[in-house]
Image: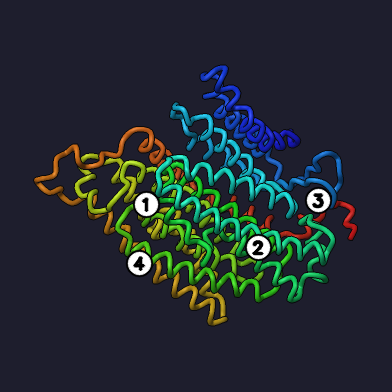
Amino acid sequence: MNAYLVLTIALPLLGAFLLPILMRSSIAIALWSGPAILIYGCWTIADIWLQGSTQPISIAIGGFAPPLGINLYIDSLALLFAFAVQLLGLIFWPFTLDQDSARRQSLMLLLVAASTGLALSGDLFNLYVFYELAAVATFGLASASGSSAAYVATLRYLILSGIGSVLTLFGIALIYSKTGTLNLAHLAQLAPAQLNDELGLTAFLSILIGIGVKAELFPVNTWVPEIYATASTRLSAFLAGLLSKLALLIILRLLLLIFHQPEAAQVLLILGILGVVSGELAAWRAKELRRMLAFSSIGQLGVMFIAMALPDGAGVLAVLALAIHHLIIKSGLFMLAEDWGGAIQRLRGSAKMAPLGAALFVLFSLSLVGMPPLPGFWAKFTLITELAGQSEPLYLIGLAVFLLATVIEASYLFRVAAILYQDAPRETLDHEIPKNEGLSLVTATLFGAGLIAAAVMIAPVGDSLNTIAVQVQDIDLYISTVNPGGSQ
């Protein structure tokens, strides 16, 4: 069954190219073939997860043993994110049927295939390939609305992403020139002797900035508010909720396996602090809901970079908790914004027209600022505990910035909540107030239910994340799984 994991990448990739052809012959088959592929992907990954095996596995595609050939590394973290890709791809699937449906659905399948590959790949070359495929699919989906604003935002994103791709490729080339391999397990063996120097740090910084474009890393995150404000809310939810976490996952893997220099962690910490400050202040000033959520996402990704910068893997559990929590919250908030887009002030009185939507917004906001007993409290408490235990001043500055950012976050989120529950002006007719209903509200409700379920089962959820965090930090386990012979 483990070998069938390859199909979670191959089938969406094949479907992306065949779907336009199917659309010409049978619209019904074409319309449901994409969701069928994603349902199969969810079932395959869930079946492997439910088998109960906690030991990671390595799959050598084509029978070429590592470090040659294509290698997939499947541990609990990879399975978790691969399942999230398939599930969110299904939840955010573009079901609308029009003359542009084939292109949007094909690009969505391509994005799912590339994102699954990012979660499962075990070597730098294939990570780069899937990174580029995800970028191509994102460009097409971001400009799908056809508006001039969407085209301009996509062009800016393309330019910035292209620069990031060049930097990533440069960093990979530096690593290959020094070690002669791109397999992550092999690099983990060679890194202490061959990459613990200035060249290794240069390679890390290049890859960090390159992949940081998708991870909303300061200062290469200027595309975020433009894309999230002009693209469909479903794409924005997928990018903010999941794709940014996959980029974060790649950086986390590289930091733990290859780049052990303290300077690498310090750079992450500084960029994380700057991301928190810039993102939260911009969100506080934002006048439109989707832009506010976009800037807020930048700030929250900055918090995850702060957690990732903690020495000796101390922040891995906090990173995972914050990432999964942010995935649920931001996906739900962007689905609410599908009907509540535009100026925040126009939402006055919306709670009367859409009480469930307003209640969900309050629920998400409370968890985002860390109100107990919601999951956001435990995620933030984990990070606070680890930061407070550090003696270096820079980490204490990170703690102070994090706490201040939480206050700012609470300010702008509760300001929106207050507007929702204010009485609408008498001259405002009911039909002028956004109601927030239909499929977007149903989807947001699903995320709200998931959040409440996580709060109820916080103990087993925390234990599972702790188990995953311990496994992710076990470098010897990673090496022995991919290369049982342990040859250099």
Q: Is mark 1 on a helix, strand or loop?
A: helix
Residue position for label 4: 408
At which x and y percent is residue 99? 46, 27
Disc 4 vs disc 2: Cβ atoms closer than 8 Å? Answer: no
> Mark 4 against mark 2, which lies toward the viewer?
2
| 190 vs 343: above or below | below
Is tag 2's residue or tag 3's residue first in the polypeptide sequence? Answer: 2
Q: Residue at x 43, y 47 (%)?
A: 150
Amino acid at the residue labelled 3: Val
Residue position for label 1: 290
Mark-to-mark CA distance, 4 and 2: 34 Å
Amino acid at the residue labelled 1: Arg
| 82 vs 345: above or below | above
Q: Residue at x 64, y 53 (%)?
A: 468
Evaluate whether residue 255 shows in this view: yes
Mark-to-mark CA distance, 2 and 3: 27 Å
The C terminus - image quarter: bottom right
At which x and y percent is residue 248? 59, 57
